[in-house]
Amino acid sequence: MVLKKQEICHHTIAILVDNEAGVLARVIGMFSGRGYNIESLTVAEVDSQKQLSRITIVTSGTPMVIEQIKAQLGRLVSTHKVSDLTIEGTSISRELALVKVVGTGENRAESLRIANIFRAHTVDSTNSSFIFEITGTPDKIDAFVQAMKPLGLIDISRTGIVAIMRGQTLSP
Amino acid sequence: MSVRTMTGSKLILKALIDQGVEVIFGYPGGSVLSLYDELFRQIKLRHILVRHEQAAVHAAEGYARSTGKVGVVLVTSGPGATNTVTGLLDALCDSVPIVCLTGQVTTYQIGNDAFQEADITGITRSCTKHNYLIKNADHIARIIHEAFYVARTGRPGPVVVDLPKDILISEGVYIEPGNVKHKSYNPQFKADINTIDNAISLIAGAKKPIFYIGGGVINSGEIASQLLIKFVHMTGFPCTQTLMGLGAFPGSDPFSLGMLGMHGTYEANLAMHGSDVIICVGARFDDRITGRLDAFSPNSKKIHIDIDSSSINKNIIVDIPIIGDVASVLKDMIEIWESRQIHIDNLALEDWWTQIKKWRTKDCLRFIQNNKMIKPQYAIQRLYEKTRELDTYITTEVGQHQMWVAQFYKFETPCRLLTSGGLGTMGYGLPSAVGVQIAHPNSLVIDIAGESSIQMNIQEIATLAQYNLPVKVFIINNQYMGMVRQWQEMLYDKCYSESYFTLLPDFVKLAESFGAIGLRVQTIKELDNVIDLMIAVNSPVIVDCCVDPMENCFPMIPPGSAHNEMIFNF
């Protein structure tokens, strides 16, 4: 079969791994060593009894590359399961961001109004600054950041996305 | 009730013995002294002292590949461990089961840039199948057993176990091998039967089929090879082998087309190019095989049998992937073939063989041996004729001589050729031969070498001499890094940049200085006698076989070309 020029697509991949020393290095080392792209990455323990961690990675590549990424992840000895949330049905994905806005007067009031519209919470406040906590899709957070930029945004911390399958399906 | 404990060093040796280990290849140093002390006080494990840690890994590879067992390496921390890196990656590329025990500084020194400290689990993460750092003596037995399980199952590979110095002297509890099961690692052995059935339907309808087989057949054990031979003969299809697959199907079998790929035969490459169904068994569509990807076998449907799912659709998209152990899949295939009473298109197959035989008449490997200098191909041909009836193992280094071995030495059974395929490690052959001879003390073990490669691990002649291992090092001496020179001649306007040795050691004197026997051949007349003498002597021998320095290795698919764009010697 002749290789066709394939389109680049984005995939959200969830990996269930043993929560042991060096496991994250194995996963991200595989990506850097093989020249794959990581757009976002989150990791935390999800089962302390079985010592399992869940890593959520957003990556991009041709379908052939995505297939290869999943195969290489599955091949790691510490991996229990690999799920491609982009193709295995519909999934919910969320990202959390903490956004610091510094300013006074009308800008300060406007930032609070916009935060309300985006349903962001105010989690810290001084007389010249706010820290907003916002949760949503990466698109929503991008939009919020854009809106805050002219109003004195000076610092952002984003988690990268976490994702899970809709309905009763288990993933990974 | 008190639980019986023992020191970390004792736990390690007990675990190794319970895993059936008989030989360790290694080199001592500060961090592993307590383990070496314990090793000295027992007789079940034999330690072979090499001269360089890289050689320890290659020796373990030679041992593993010629026996089917796991090869074991023991080295110290820091430089001892970093010296194993090339060997480990070599084993990873060629799927060789190795357990490499590395010393480490004490657990409380780790991270402090201590003397002879190296982050070896970090360094070897991408050149091992898996690695461990043991931080508690109670984990030693479990981890060693796990390491062996990971190394030998699925697609085999090297596993590093890093052992901090204080763990070796602290007390821990032993666990028997049977009580260890891995939490997550569980390779798929048996393949999906419906997929195999679909593959059989595709094979049954083939008009221009070809088996393309690789090292996976050898790794799957002798039974895989026997099943393959049976299946090939049942179908009557041609069969071509990769470098790693040589011997998995008998080289002199009339159905064999020899090796394929960059220096493969004309008939093998054209058959791949023209085929309509490729049955890939335990090979991985490597770039040396495929040539230009977009022109690779353009009209064929492809079946790919591999235990490693990441090998599938990596370079070439296949139509029917079968994930499983080669022997298990072939057994299922034969059963289905028989139960469905498959009738193939014999007329089409006859036409296909007529075509292949036409390609064969090109006699693509032919060379002209005038009565001047020895041609390297001729030397290997003579070596083959003189040793084919004997119990012979051949190892090689990397370069032209390696390709000539692949072309001219016909291997009839698996595990008889040991060569560095995936990584192409110069300096592999001699230490690998050490391991083979240790495993097979009464067999004839020959390292067919080049004068350049041999210098990369030449210190191991001392190991041969120390253990009186009668390995024969047959150096095809053309004074150049031959393959580099060939590429420079063909692709860089004959600018022989740094590929010529203005100084080479006198290999005869060098052999003698190590206590080995040195022989030199310069004329065609002497060649047979020297080979006879080399075989007859029961001690290490180095033969310096001076050959035509300008000979090139053909046929060849130039880099970036397709299978039907081969170039020849004539």
Image: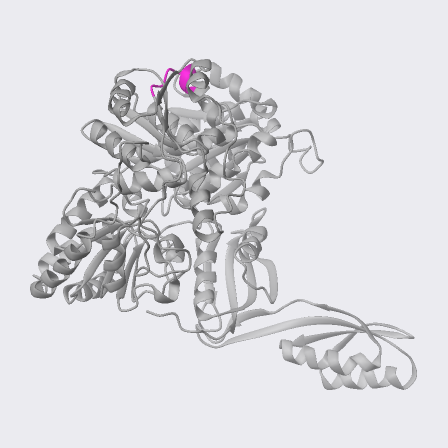
In front: B303, or B500? B500
Residue A88 position, x and y percent, is 43, 72
Extent of the magenta region: B463-470
* Residue at 31% from the left image edge and 43% from the top image edge: B219
Q: Looking at the picture, does residue B81 appear above or below residue A32?
A: above
* Residue at 32% from the left image edge and 35% from the top image edge: B376
* Residue at 57% from the left image edge and 35% from the top image edge: B82
Residue B17 position, x and y percent, is 39, 26
Residue B469 in magenta? yes
Side of B538 relative to A63 (left or right): left
Colouring used for the render: one colour
Residue B398 occupies quadrant? top left
**Res B173 seen here:** no
Residue B125 occupies quadrant? top right
**Res B153 seen here:** yes
Residue A144 position, x and y percent, is 72, 80
